Amino acid sequence: MTTGTIKKSVLVAVGVIENGASEIFICRRGESQHQAFKWEFPGGKVEAGETVSQALARELEEEIGIRVASCQPFMRIEHDYGDKQVILDIRKVTAFEGEAHGREGQPSRWVPIPELHRYDFPAANAPIVEKLQVQAEG
């Protein structure tokens, strides 16, 4: 009897950050990262002993230099890339302090919601873009 390799799921806290102009902040992944050069919503791995909200606050401060003042659950996505399984716990960041920027040198920008589909996101992010665009259309 052969056994397949068991893939470890990675829990990731993801922030959908919207400004007052209905633009969403996105960053481009680096060359050495999984899904290199694709655009993403910022966030990162939830460490042992952290809640999703704590991980999101830590990651957003480290990655893009903002402090989360308020966030709410947006959606949850499980995706299998073949080489890696991810569980994305996405929060909509509704209030923050600081100026969002690519703190680690990564390209980043504010994008109007109707234009998000023009960016190359990892497959797991497609439902996020779809939900944002449907909500924006009202």
Image: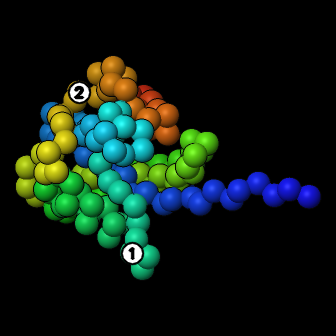
Q: What's the image's color scheme?
A: rainbow
Q: Mark 2 sits on what residue?
A: 112
Please, what secondary structure does the residue beneath circle 2 have? Answer: strand
Q: Residue at x 34, y 45 (%)?
A: 32
Q: Is residue 122 above or below residue 118?
A: below
Which residue, as the protein is rendered here, is positioned at the far right?
A: 1
Residue drawn at the location 39% of the way across and 32% of the way down: 121
Q: Residue placed at 55% from the left, 49% from the top?
A: 84
Instruction: Give the vertical position of 97 relative to 29 (above or below).
Output: below
Q: Residue at x 58, y 46 (%)?
A: 83
Residue 58 can be seen, yes or no = yes
Quote the CA–CA distance across marks 1 and 2. 32 Å
Question: Looking at the picture, how far across and down is residue 23, in whole percent?
Answer: 21, 33
Relative placement, left or right, of 7 versus 98 is right
Q: Nearer the viewer, residue 7 or 54?
A: 7
Residue underneath mark 1 = 50
Quadrant of the image for the N terminus?
bottom right
Single out the residue that lies furthest toward the bottom.
49
Q: Residues within 10 Å of mark 1 (few under 14, many from 20)?
A: few
Q: Position of residue 78 (x, y in %)?
A: 57, 49
| Amino acid type indicated by mark 1 | Glu
Locate residue 104 relative to residue 35 in the image: left or right.
left
Local SS, label 1: loop
Query: Callout 2 environment at 10 Å: few (<14), some (14 to 19), or many (20+)?
Result: some
